[in-house]
Image (cartoon, grey):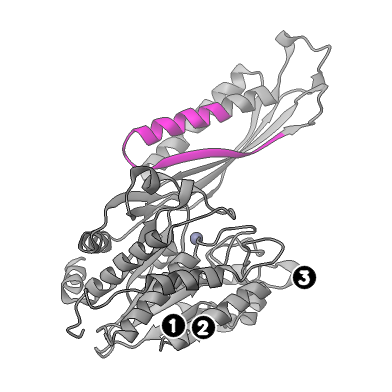
Amino acid sequence: MTNSTAAELQIDADRLWRDLMELAGITEPERPYTRRSFSAQFLQGRDWLAERYRAAGLSVRIDAGGNLIGRLPGTRDGAPAIMIGSHSDSVPGGGRFDGIAGVVAALEIARTLASGGVSLAHPLEVVDFLAEEPSEFGLSCIGSRAMAGALDASHLALTGPGQETLAAAIERVGGAPGRIDAARRADVHAFLELHIEQGPLLESSRVDVGIVTGIVGIARIEIRLVGEAAHAGTAPMSARRDAAVAAAQVILAVRDLARTMDARGDGYFVATCGVVGILPGASNVVPGEARIVIDARSESAPLMQRFLDEIGPRAADIAQASGVALERFELVSRNPPTACDGALQQVLRESAAQTGCSAMSMASGAGHDAAFVARIAPAAMLFVPCRNGRSHCPEEWTEPSELALGARVLLQAVRRIDGASYGATQRRQP
Ligand SMILES: [Zn+2]
């Protein structure tokens, strides 16, 4: 690193904001703000981004997994890369900040270093991961999976609109599915992702940035309750086996148990019954069947296990008391939680203090690319506030000053990671 001090090196908040708004403006015109992965708008956004990377002096490539990567060389021969970035795709009718806040912040940091004449010892890579949001292929985090070596042949065979395979779609955006293993990285020194919080904690606590302790693991459980359909006018209350009534009690039990788990103080825990179906679904028929899908999330694997151990017997008790059969109780999927790297969290904490902003530790209730990158490198995340905690909607909003502050902390963190002390800490760890 050169002798340039932090005071001399400042990100340009106006330029950062202009970039964010320009990229956000590349949207399906009828459905702002939508830039679905693999779509024409997505490719247009990437062309815009690649042009910005080049103008900043970065070399640009698309890896085998379809990730768009800009790179500044480091001064030390063979040093592993410091990687920063997020994703440029959006959900349908999404916002202007989810994903691209981290992408343009990464761009601004690289541009600030390059234009300030500051060379890092490590190469700096800014990444736009391919398809972080659930895609038309039914899969999310496609690019970061590939980078972690977790995108396999069965994923590549998934089909989307027009029966296009995921492999063909990755090829269409410039990736190389035939040699997908080449996307796997073993040369990443550290990865940092700036992202909007997508929740209300920072705003309500009046804290500038969130340092993410971990990204939740997600379990999904499918439940089927079978009672007996009957005439809503002639079946007496005492003789009913109403599946909807049992389902309602299961939903309340899920909520109560989730509250108990979260209140234990052992880690973040939430659970939701977002799918509830009643059959036959007629106003004059006592419901004979109900289907519920529980989505439970926690940063703590033991806490999740406890929930899974307790919710089954509770559902069975409720069914029995309601005269209904618990025909199905199945754990249909379960992803483990990902802890963010402790040394990187400490770097972010010190960087926030040095930048003069307040910080709090918090879990991420949403999934992120960082969870996959964490499989191959130390990874951590920095959250910036978002108004009223709203996300995945056109109203999604972060103030220009809040975004700029996050970018400043991230720049500071990159410089600290590049310094000798972080490397020494990493080497001491087993
Ligand atoms: Zn996101």
Q: How far separated are the C-alphas under marks 3 and 1?
A: 32 Å
> Which residues lie in the magenta part?
251-277
Q: Which mark is residue 70?
A: 1
Mark 3–mark 1 CB contact (< 8 Å): no
Nearer to me, 191 or 85:
85
Label 2: which secondary element:
helix
Question: Can residue 214 be seen at all in this image of the molecule?
Answer: yes
Kindly identify which residue carries mark 2.
50
Left or right side of 291 for 296? left
The alpha-carbon separation of the residues under discs 2 and 3 comes to: 28 Å
**In the image, what residue type sits under mark 3?**
Gly
Nearest the eye: 277 or 394: 394
Tell me the residue that label 3 is attached to.
162
Instruction: Determine crowd level at label 2: few under 14, some 14-19, many 20+ residues with C-alpha closer than 10 A.
Output: many
Task: Specify whether 2 is left or right of 317.
Answer: left
Q: Where is residue 173 in the image (x, y as percent from the top left)?
A: 61, 80
Instruction: Please tell me whether residue 70 is drawn above or below residue 267 in the rendered image.
Output: below
Quarter of the N terminus within the rendering:
bottom left
Mark 1 crowdedness (10 Å alpha carbons): few <14, some 14-19, many ≥20: many
Mark 2: amino acid: Ala
Question: Counting other residues with Cα less than 10 Å from the Cα at mark 3, is it few (<14), some (14-19), or many (20 or more)?
Answer: few
- Going 54% across and 27% down the picture, which residue do you hit? 252
- Name the spot of residue 198 as percent of width and height, x first: 47, 52
Q: Mark 3 against mark 1, which lies toward the viewer?
A: 1
Above or below, 168 against 327 in this view is below
**Mark 1 element type:** strand
Q: State the separation of the CA atoms marked 2 and 1.
A: 8 Å
